Image (cartoon, grey):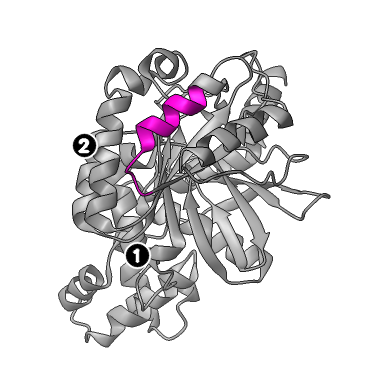
Amino acid sequence: MGSVCLDLEVSQNKNMEKQDIKSMTLEEIKGIMGSLGQPPFRALQVYRWLQRGVSSFEEMSDLSKELRSRLQEQYYIPSVSIIRKQVSALDGTVKYLFGLLDGECVECVLMQYHHGYSVCISSQVGCKMGCTFCATGKSGFSRNLRASEILSQVQAAQKDCGNRISNIVLMGMGEPLDNYENVLRFLELVSSPEGMNIGMRHISLSTCGIVDKIYDLADRKLQLTLSVSLHAPNDKIRVKTMPINRRWGVEELLKACRYYGKTTGRRISFEYAMISGVNDSDSCAEELAGRLHGILSHVNLIPVNNVTGNGYVKSPPERLKRFIKILEKKGITATVRRTLGSDIDASCGQLRRRMQEEEMKA
């Protein structure tokens, strides 16, 4: 592992003074081609190669050797490499640990459903949010991912499995709205008709509740699905598990969610980790139903993950059923998230954290 990271760091140092061409839009690449005295159609050629996931200019076989050389002098192409890969014996879910050019690592999960392949990708190396039930936050925060690095996860998973990715979930490591500009650029690139052409309605973005960005996202009317990590019906409970609640309380967050729903016409998915004895009581269900009244929404109940050191226990099945029954009686639709990859550390942050622990012991 150490030699792999060293090689990646050397590669990154060589690229420090170059520009990331893979994070550029087609129009921006047209500008580059113009400055190099090239016709506009060359930009589309370069852009399509980048969207296919090439890692070097040498792979762009329909460009002249001279043009490839000039591009190599000024630009670099970020990519990811598979450092670890785990395949679930239970359901075929694949967990990747991808290496970046600077030696950092991020996680990605590939899931197969009846409607096609979905990939859950990371937006940051680590996370600042500090949610107590999440393994990612326990590993600390290193940096934001560039748009190209987010895109590269989708491309690498698609190449490895040999099937087209049809759905994307920004719910891996990191808080997408804390890396807002790079995430917006990624969304523009991945939905481009000249690129991977994955429509916004096939993309979900999960946030712990950065309210100002939710308003901005609503005004952009991108038609993606917004998933909000709520996990509690009130501030008293939520602030104990989610530090972000000190900045934006439950009522302020839900006000932004109402605005998002009315502005976009899109249903919001509220993620709710069921923690035994913490947020799974009948009174919590009743209060949650009252809070969500009038919001176009769906509640996704998630048995809490067993993250080392937090002491949380997942709610038993009968409690989940009772919670759902109360919500539905109040007119709120709710389901229990299907658990995939439980035998391969498929929840975000677990594989990277395990690798860090192994390196510390080595």
Disc 2 marks a residue whose amino acid type is Asp
Q: Contact (CB < 8 A) between labels 1 and 2?
A: no
Q: Is residue 268 left or right of residue 215?
A: right
81 versus 349 height, above or below: below
Which label lies toward us, 1 or 2?
2
Q: CA distance from mark 1 to mark 2?
A: 23 Å
| Residue depicted at 36% across the width and 82% down the height | 45
The percent position of residue 48, horizontal first and vertical second, equals: 40, 77
Comparing 356 with 174, the one in front is 174
Disc 1 marks a residue whose amino acid type is Leu
Q: How many marks?
A: 2
Question: What span is in magenta?
Answer: 284-296
- Residue designated by label 1: 189
Q: Main secondary structure of the magenta part?
A: helix
Dividing the image into 4 quarters, which one contains the C terminus?
Answer: top right
| Residue depicted at 36% across the width and 62% down the height | 22
Q: Is residue 187 left or right of residue 237?
A: left
| Residue depicted at 26% across the width and 48% down the height | 260
Query: Dot 2: what SS?
Result: helix
Comparing 112 with 339, the one in front is 339
Among all residues in the image, which is located at the extreme front?
A: 329
The percent position of residue 148, horizontal first and vertical second, equals: 39, 56
The percent position of residue 331, horizontal first and vertical second, equals: 46, 43
> Does 139 appear in magenta?
no
- Residue designated by label 2: 212
114 versus 168 height, above or below: below
> Does 290 appear in magenta?
yes
| Disc 2: CA contacts within 10 A as few (<14), some (14-19) or many (>=20) | few
Query: Dot 1: what SS?
Result: helix
Q: Is residue 242 visible?
A: yes
| Residue depicted at 72% across the width and 26% down the height | 316
